[in-house]
Image (cartoon, helix red, strand yellow):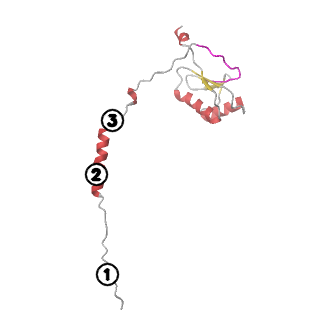
Amino acid sequence: MRIAARRHETDFEINVISLIDVLLTLLMFFVLTTTFVQHSRLKVSLPEASQSTTQQNPDALVIVIDRSGRYYIANQAIAGEGEVALQQAILQAVGDNRKRNVILRADAKTPNQAVVTAMDALGRLGFTHLALATTSSQGDRQ
C-alpha cells in the first residue's frame, strides 16, 4: 500500500485588472498634459547667397530643374519622369566617374521635392561633390 502525502496546490493568480486601470489613468494623464509642437509656428531663416563669385569647373555636370520639376542635363530634357529616369540619364552623361562635380541649378519656383529627388538620385549613385547654384541678391533687384 502506498501512502502519498497529499499536496494542497492552490492556483496562484495575479489580478491585473487594477494594474490596467492604473496604466490607463496614467496614459490619460500624460496625453492630456503633454504639449504638442506645432510646426506652423516655427520661424525658418533661409540662407542668402553671398555676392562673391566662385570659379566654375568646366567639367562639372550641370543638372537644371525648371519650374514644373522637369530635369535637363546638358540642355537636353530627360525622357521619362522620376528618380529612375534621372539616374539613367546621369549614368549616360557621366559614365563611371563618380568624383565629378555636380551643380544643381533649380528655378526659384521649383518644388522642393524635385530638388530633393535629384539630390537623392545623385547620392544613390555615389556622387559626393554637389553644389547648388544660386544668384546674388543684387541680381534679383534689377
Q: Position of residue 57 (x, y in %)?
A: 68, 20
- Mark 1 touches mark 2? (CB < 8 Å): no
**Magenta span:** 52-64
- Secondary structure beneath disc 2? helix
Closer to the chain start, of discs 3 and 2, is 2
- Indicate the amino acid at tag 1: Arg
104 vs 52, nearest the viewer? 52
Task: Please provide percent x and percent y for residue 55.
Answer: 66, 16
| Quarter of the N terminus within the rendering | bottom left
Q: Position of residue 107 (x, y in %)?
A: 56, 20
Q: Secondary structure at mark 1?
A: loop
Residue on which the image places disc 3? 35
- The quarter of the displayed image where residue 54 is located: top right
Q: Which residue is mark 2?
A: 22
Q: Are marks 1 and 3 in contact (CB under 8 Å)?
A: no
The quarter of the displayed image where residue 71 is located: top right
Q: What secondary structure do most residues of the magenta stretch adopt?
A: loop
Mark seen at residue 6: 1
Dot 2 surroundings within 10 Å: few (below 14), some, or many (20 or more)? Answer: few
Residue pictured at 61% horizontal, 14% vertical? 53
Could you tell me which residue is drawn at 67 percent across and 22 percent down?
A: 75
Q: Find residue 87 and report its image quarter.
A: top right
Residue type, label 2: Val
Question: Is residue 95 magenta-colored?
Answer: no
